[in-house]
Image (cartoon, grey):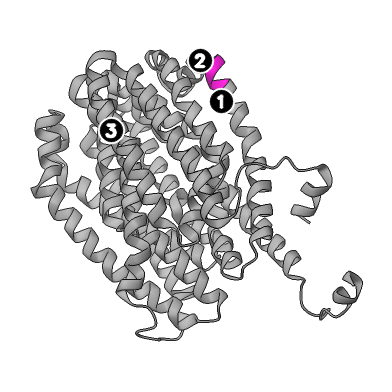
């Protein structure tokens, strides 16, 4: 029977499984390249800043980066996930006009979100945080630049995810951080070679220039290659439909980002800027552990939306579990390196004083490995319409973790905060993994493939 079915296929058309594998492999190469460039630029950027700003100045930068990261997520309104979901879904269902309408609504609301965040940062909580909680006059003087930086990052993420919805992983990778990273490192290197030291205000302005250039090019390419070629179909997607997906995902991402950065905010209120800098250096470096899964999560979202919409759950689970296995091996190797050689590794990227963060690096790495070993569970829930469940998990667990961080920081310092953050994140990942199986019927943890299966995955 199997032979008879195969013989009826039109030989002029690629087999669906083969076509998907080829698309994923080609896209994966671009994702790997783009993320590799971004990670490399991030490491070089951190190494330069730690030397150019000094320990206290780098601690101030860590706080500034945390503030901008959370503010940019607030400005996105969850629209980046909605863009991937609706664009990929619409194109998969042969509704190109709906895909264009998605982009029109997404960017219209992105402007609203950006304006609101800009105003709040320069006239509200943003200014109060830097002036009173963190006692950072350098940041207070640059609050306008910080607000612009936040808005630019929000648009950059939305633009990158719009490319991903079109399955154009090439430009999603380039404009998701690679171009900005190269521009940023190039400008900072010139300053380092010419002057050696600089101020936090100059650094922020350099980053704003790099982000603005990258965003401008990205928007032009998106319109020329994709959005401008789609038919106009007003009313094919409503604001209610858009925010039914975007709003809960927005809550999830905001809460998760607050958990990811609240540790530095809280430590900034109780510890010296130098101590915050050491913690921040470890927290930035630990992202290397989860990079393999991040690469997978940048690759699979449009395929999750497409295959789930077609009801191909078993095929989707196979892809998710095999790609999770590929991500798990390097993540565990990096974890062991950080546990046993954390001090020397920190001392390689940063000045020698930062080696004191070795214990923090090891503790934070544990939750990243849990993330990798539970696979792409969160993104699977988001792309299959179960964002409300994700929101409840994120708000409940992350909220408790943030409260605990506040009390632990005063008594146990950075080590105690690292333990709370690592434990809280691990619980979130485990609950997402279990919820994915319950609500979609799909497991996302690694399935150790045979050599033959690995060959077939990329054939």
For residue 269, what is the image quadrant? Answer: top left
Tell me how far mark 3 sits from mark 2, CA to CA.
30 Å
Residue 198 seen from this side = no
Label 1: which secondary element: helix
Q: Which residue appears at 10% of the width and 38% of the height?
A: 128
Closer to the camera: disc 1 or disc 3?
3
Comparing 11 with 169, the one in front is 11
Please indicate whether residue 344 sits to the left or right of residue 18 in the image: left
Going from N to C along the chain, the mark reached first, 1 or 3, is: 1
Looking at the rendered image, the quarter that the C terminus falls into is: bottom right
For residue 131, what is the image quadrant? Answer: top left
Disc number placed over residue 402 in the picture, else none: 3
Q: Are marks 1 and 2 in contact (CB under 8 Å)?
A: no
Q: Is residue 113 above or below residue 146?
A: below
Q: Which residues are magenta?
A: 337-341
Tell me how far mark 1 sits from mark 2, CA to CA.
14 Å
Q: Which residue appears at 46% of the width and 62% of the height?
A: 385
Closer to the camera: disc 1 or disc 2?
1
> Percent position (x, y) of residue 439?
51, 55
**Disc 1 marks which residue?**
335
**Disc 2 marks which residue?**
344
Tell me how far mark 1 sits from mark 3, CA to CA.
25 Å
């Amino acid at each position: 029977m199997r032979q008879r079915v195969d013989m009826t296929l039109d030989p002029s058309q690629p087999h669906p499984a083969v076509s998907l594998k080829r698309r994923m492999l080609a896209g994966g190469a671009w994702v790997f390249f783009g993320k590799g460039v971004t990670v490399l630029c991030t490491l070089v950027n951190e190494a330069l800043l730690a030397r150019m700003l000094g320990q206290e100045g780098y601690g101030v930068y860590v706080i500034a980066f945390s503030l901008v990261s959370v503010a940019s997520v607030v400005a996105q309104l969850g629209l980046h996930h909605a863009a991937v979901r609706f664009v990929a879904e619409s194109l998969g269902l042969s509704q190109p006009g709906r895909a264009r309408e998605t982009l029109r609504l997404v960017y219209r609301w992105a402007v609203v979100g950006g304006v609101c965040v800009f105003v709040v940062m320069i006239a509200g909580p943003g200014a109060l945080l830097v002036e009173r909680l963190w006692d950072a006059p350098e940041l207070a003087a640059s609050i306008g630049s910080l607000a612009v930086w936040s808005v630019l990052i929000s648009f950059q993420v939305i633009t990158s995810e719009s490319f991903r919805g079109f399955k154009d992983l090439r430009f999603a990778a380039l404009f998701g951080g690679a171009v900005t990273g190269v521009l940023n490192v190039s400008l900072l290197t010139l300053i380092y070679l010419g002057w050696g030291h600089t101020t936090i205000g100059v650094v922020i302005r350099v980053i704003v220039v790099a982000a603005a250039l990258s965003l401008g090019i990205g928007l032009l390419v998106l319109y020329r290659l994709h959005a401008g070629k789609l038919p106009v179909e007003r009313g094919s997607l409503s604001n209610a439909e858009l925010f039914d997906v975007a709003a809960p995902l927005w809550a999830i991402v905001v809460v998760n980002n607050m958990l990811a950065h609240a540790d530095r905010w809280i430590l900034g209120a109780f510890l010296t800027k130098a101590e915050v800098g050491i913690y921040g250096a470890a927290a930035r470096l630990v992202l290397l552990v989860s990079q393999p899964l991040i690469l997978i999560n940048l690759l699979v979202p449009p395929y999750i939306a497409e295959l789930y919409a077609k009801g191909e759950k078993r095929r989707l689970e196979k892809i998710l579990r095999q790609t999770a296995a590929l991500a798990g091996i390097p993540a565990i190797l990096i974890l062991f390196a950080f546990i046993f050689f954390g001090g020397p590794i920190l001392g390689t990227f940063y000045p020698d004083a930062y080696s004191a963060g070795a214990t923090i690096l090891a503790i934070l790495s544990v939750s990243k490995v849990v993330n990798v070993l539970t696979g792409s569970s969160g993104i699977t829930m988001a792309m299959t319409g179960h964002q409300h469940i994700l929101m409840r998990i994120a708000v409940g667990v992350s909220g408790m973790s943030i409260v605990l961080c506040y009390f632990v920081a005063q008594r146990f310092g950075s080590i105690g905060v690292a333990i709370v953050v690592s434990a809280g994140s691990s619980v979130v990942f485990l609950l997402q993994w279990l919820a994915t199986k319950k609500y979609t019927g799909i497991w996302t943890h690694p399935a150790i493939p045979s050599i033959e299966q690995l060959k077939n995955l990329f054939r």
